Image (tube, helix red, strand yellow):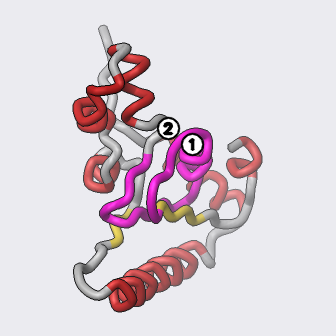
Amino acid sequence: MLELSKLTVPVISIVIGEGSSGGALALGVGNKVFMLENAIYSILSPEGYASILWKDSSRTKEAAEKMKLTAKDLYELKVIDKIIKEPQGEEEQCFLKVSRSLKKEIQKSVEEMREMLPEQIREDRYQKFRNMGDFKRLS
C-alpha cells in the first residue's frame, strides 16, 4: 500500500469477484476503483467478522449486512468510484458486455488523468483515500 501510494502514474483497481483481506486494502489505493455489481469487497470475510465480533460464525448473514461489502454500499461510502453492471443471460455474451463496459471505463479514466502531472496523480489518489467512508466526530 505504501508503494502504491507513492506512484506517480494512475492506478485503476477493479474488483471482479471477491476482494478481501490485505489484497482488498491494496485495491483501495487506486485513483479509480471499479467493482462489478455482484462482487464483494471487504478486509475480512463475513464468517471471520461474525467469529470475531460474536464468537458465532453462524451469524454470517447478519455480519455481511453490517459490513457494507456490496457494490451499492461501497459506492455510497465513496470507497469505489463506479459500479459495473452485470447483465443476465448467456455467460459468454454477459462476459463480452462486462468486458466492453470495463474497457470503456478504463479508457475514460486514463483520458481524464492523461493531462495530470505526476504529483497531481499522487495527490488525487491521496485525497480520494482520505475522503472514503462516512464518519461522525464525537464532541
* The residue stretch that appears in magenta: 16-41
Q: Quadrant of residue 66?
A: top left
- Identify which amino acid the numbered label 2 is placed on: Ile
**Left or right relative to 31: residue 134:** left
- Asked if residue 78 is among those painted magenta in the image, a careful observer would answer no
Name the spot of residue 92 as percent of width and height, x first. 39, 89
Front-most of residues 1 and 53? 53
Residue for badge 1: 25
Q: Position of residue 122 (x, y in %)?
A: 66, 54
Give the SS element for disc 2. loop
Q: Answer above or below: position of 61 versus 112.
A: above
Q: Residues within 10 Å of mark 1 (few under 14, many from 20)?
A: some
Describe the element under mark 1 as helix, strand or loop.
helix
- Foreground pick, 90 / 42: 90
From the image, tell me which residue sits under label 2.
43
Q: Residue at x 57, y 56 (%)?
A: 30
Q: Position of residue 8 (x, y in %)?
A: 73, 60
Which of the two discs, 1 and 2, labels the residue nearer the N terminus? 1
Q: Is residue 35 magenta?
A: yes
Quadrant placement of the C terminus = top left
Residue depicted at 44% across the width and 29% down the height: 48
Q: Looking at the picture, does residue 72 appear above or below residue 64? A: below
Q: Is residue 78 left or right of residue 127?
A: left
Mark 1 or mark 2, whichever is nearer to me: 2
Residue 74, above or below 115: above
Task: Say if mark 1 contacts mark 2, CB within 8 Å.
Answer: yes
Q: Nearer the viewer, residue 63 or 99?
A: 63
